[in-house]
Image (spheres, rainbow, N blue to C red):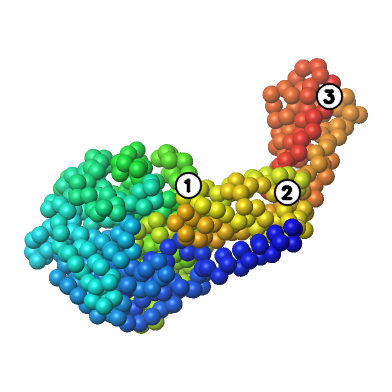
Amino acid sequence: MKLFLKILLIILIFTVNAHNGFSQKEARYWALPGFFLDFYGGDTIPSLITGSNNFTNFANGTISDAYGNLLFYTNGATIWNRNNDTMKNGDSLFFYPGSVQGALIIPYPGDTNLYFLFTLRYCHIGCSYLYNNNIGLYYHLIDKRGNNGLGEVISKNNQLFPKVTSGKLTAVKHANNEAIWVISHKLYTDEFCAYLITKNGLDTSPVISRIGIPCDLSHPETWNGQMKASPDNKLLAVYSKRLGIEIFQFDNKTGKISNPIFIDFKKLISSKFEIKGIEFSPEGRFLYLTVRDETTNRTCILQFDLQDLSSVSIINSMEIIIKSKKEFEFLQSGIDGRIYCTTQSSYLAAITSPSEKGKSCNFKDSFIYLKNWYALSFPDIMPSFFFKPAFHAKNTCLSDTTLFAITDTSHIDSVLWCFGDSLSTVNNNSTLKLTSHCFTDTGVYNVVVYVWHDKGEKDTLQREIRISFYPKADFLINDSIQCLNLNKFICYDSSSIVSGSFTWEWDFGDKTKSYVQNPVHQYNKAGEYDLSLRILSDYGCEAKIEKKVK
């Protein structure tokens, strides 16, 4: 039986490794000005393929099928099929070319042959009269079976609402993991509009949330910016170029938006600044922004930790990842787990480990060389394509039972844990979502969990876990000296420490403490006291001992 179990696990691991670990291959290709980025290679650097007929920098969208085959792409005005030809009936769409989020492609829930394209046509102060007509949010319906499998636009330029919209557009999966919310914001109001798409079609009556800073003439800073949803479908982040960011909670069951948090960058960064880009990490814990400080002519990439959703905690968590004379602008997640950044040069920058805190997120300012091409922005893509849950480990000292938990199991069907502890033989694996393991020795273990989602997608999560020795706490008191020296107790730490760095906490039993290794203490009153020493390793392993002194 044990031999059969080992063979079964090997087959399962081989099967998962044959998959590239992506949550959704629909975002495999990005159509950029004159070229494509292809994310087929898993963790390798995306490849550059020439041939895209899209030569605009904004209002871009690209979609592939569930197997990663390119279907079509758009600049908001025209749709091109996989052969780079204009799709049948795919021209003369209502759009505005200056909107970064001006085109968003959404798969039709329950029908793999149909796709919605949403486009924004709006006009800010000073824009061309050409785009002042037919302003609003539009949708278009594409059938990939049309025109002998090259696709056809079967309905276009359908207006959802005629009022002008701010240039903000994103989508969130419904709580049932099938339907999809499409979210935009009306200009001149504080109204967010969430439209629900189900297998029965698009509900043209939106769920309206009146919340946050209005996009109106009294707040012209709010007109330009972006809105991103977290890949776990729980948060919305909206930035206005010269004002700051707003973070909201999103109820993906009802479509309602609530609990606004405003971070004022005029107080946090500079009196003169411009926010360029915004993006969440794959599991939704961290929020990244690119900000240009116009007083110093430096661009910063900032990281905020959203684990505690209070403005004070978010502000205090801010990390400056890099500050440079280089131009870092728009941010976009890829299905390889990285966040990419435009640079106004022939390179794309990247945050290669965006789920890590601080500078451990590993920012690379010249990650992809574009040769003779360039990109000023990225396609607008439904964020749930990039969701990848993380996992945490608790109790990592030798002889502990180490507990493992995945951060979000709401849509996970099954898992396979591999603890990297070969000496534990059959105990080296587990199929429980919440599991534990007792490691056989100290050291660094590469723990991997293969995740099967309830819609068939697969993910591979991994991280290194360090197992350390427990220290042994002990101390001595120089009794002969303390009587001769005005009741001063000289304490000597004699703990057994194997490796690593440690902190010490002495409690003298009289409401005073010390944090040095070998303290000297004088009591003000005679009596018996409980004196204790607590030592803690930098890996979280703790030991404590207590003795009585008179």
Q: Earlier in the sequence, mark 3 or mark 2?
A: 2
Compared with 206, 279 (above or below) is: below
Q: Which of 43 and 501 is in front in this view?
A: 43
Q: How far apart are marks 3 and 1 (CA)?
A: 54 Å
Residue at x 84%, y 21% (from the top left corner): 550
Q: Residue 438 carries which label?
A: 2
Residue 512 image offset from top left, x and y in percent: 69, 27
Q: Which amino acid does label 1 sit on?
A: Ser
Badge 3, how many Cα within 10 Å: few under 14, some, many 20+? Answer: some
Residue marked by disc 3: 549
Name which quarter of the figure residue 482 lies in.
top right
Q: Which of 411 and 318 is in front in this view?
A: 411
Q: Is residue 344 visible?
A: no
Residue at x 20%, y 69% (from the top left corner): 153
Q: Can residue 90 be seen in this view?
A: yes
Residue 341 image offset from top left, x and y in percent: 39, 65
Q: Is mark 2 on a helix, strand or loop?
A: loop
Q: Is mark 1 on a helix, strand or loop?
A: loop
Q: Residue lying farthest front?
A: 1
Q: Which amino acid does label 3 sit on?
A: Val
Residue marked by disc 1: 410
Residue 522 as seen in the image, left or right of residue 141: right
Residue 13 image offset from top left, x and y in percent: 62, 64
The quadrant the N terminus occupies is bottom right
Badge 1, how many Cα within 10 Å: few under 14, some, many 20+? Answer: few
Compared with 532, 496 (above or below) is: below
